Amino acid sequence: MDGNGRWAKQRHLPRAMGHQRGVDAVRTLVRAARQMGLEVLTLYAFSTENWRRSEDEVSTLMGLLKRYIQADLDEFVANNVRLKIIGEYRALASDIVELLDHALERTAQNDGTTLVVALNYGSQDEIARAAAKAAAKGPITPETIDAELDTAGLPPLDLLIRTSGEVRLSNFLLWQAAYAEMIFTDVLWPDFTPDHLRAALEEFSTRERRYGGR
Ligand code: FPP
């Protein structure tokens, strides 16, 4: 969800306003994903590297996350949305951990769209943790690592979209992206609408996926 800061800068607004509009985009996209019948939507909300931002910005992001979950949890429950978190979210502030645990519990039985939020997430960290767990149990193979990733149990990643013109993965779902299709768009995250998602899915449907075969 890249480009909140630039969206705000272009308008001579504080970065926090960009993040606020980023959350508005999240809310709209999650609703659209549900209506489109997407099985899983994963959002990269806070990386292990994002701690390097100012204390002020980190606290803005945490506040926005908290308010979003508080405000939309009943809607998730009512609309059969299951929440899942990837990353070491238990290292976040205790009030956020409690809120997330409560939201996870309340939506655990839902089987409509799964909304996966990556929080305090870094893909290399996730792979290292999974490899250590796999090694403690037996041989390390792609399958045994896969089973220990934070994404275990989710379907394979089909499509990865990065907004705001950056063309790199930035430590996001590196393992899971092995055969994912990728779409890079110049649209800044706060401007990303359900129509952009629909266009990306349209493009995805034209890609020929060979998984290394011919
Ligand atoms: C990238 O924009 C965005 C983030 C680092 C944070 C995204 C988080 C939220 C929108 C808030 C909470 C999340 C949810 C799921 C409600 P940037 O600041 O890197 O923008 P820039 O590259 O233009 O500076």
Image (cartoon, rainbow, N blue to C red):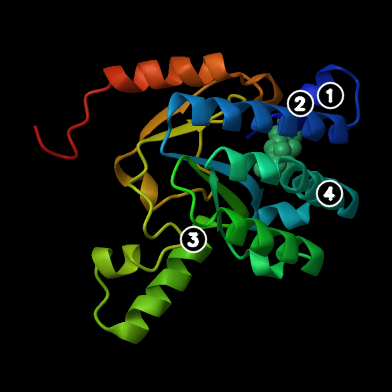
Q: Residue at x 44, y 47 (%)?
A: 111
| SS at circle 3 | helix
- Counting residues from the start of the chain, the first of labels 4 and 3 encountered is 4
Q: Do the residues labelled 1 and 4 touch (CB within 8 Å)?
A: no
Mark 2 CB lies closer than 8 A to ligand 1: yes
Q: Are marks 1 and 3 in contact (CB under 8 Å)?
A: no
Q: Disc number at residue 168?
A: none
Residue on which the image places disc 2: 6
- Please, is residue 133 above or below residue 54 in the view? below
Residue on which the image places disc 3: 124
Disc 2 to disc 1, C-alpha distance: 5 Å
Quarter of the C terminus within the rendering: top left
Residue on which the image places disc 1: 9
- Counting residues from the start of the chain, the first of labels 4 and 2 encountered is 2
Mark 2 neighbour density, 10 Å: few (under 14) some (14–19) many (20 or more): some
Mark 1 CB lies closer than 8 A to ligand 1: yes
The residue type indicated by label 1 comes to Lys
Residue on which the image places disc 4: 63
Query: Quick check: 42 left or right of 51?
Result: left
Quarter of the N terminus within the rendering: top right
| SS at circle 4 | helix
Task: Tell me the mark number nearer the camera, choosing from 4 and 2.
Answer: 4
Disc 1 to disc 3, C-alpha distance: 31 Å
Mark 4 neighbour density, 10 Å: few (under 14) some (14–19) many (20 or more): few
Disc 4 to disc 3, C-alpha distance: 26 Å
Disc 1 to disc 4, C-alpha distance: 21 Å
The residue type indicated by label 2 comes to Arg
Q: Which residue is drawn at 73% across and 28% down?
A: 24
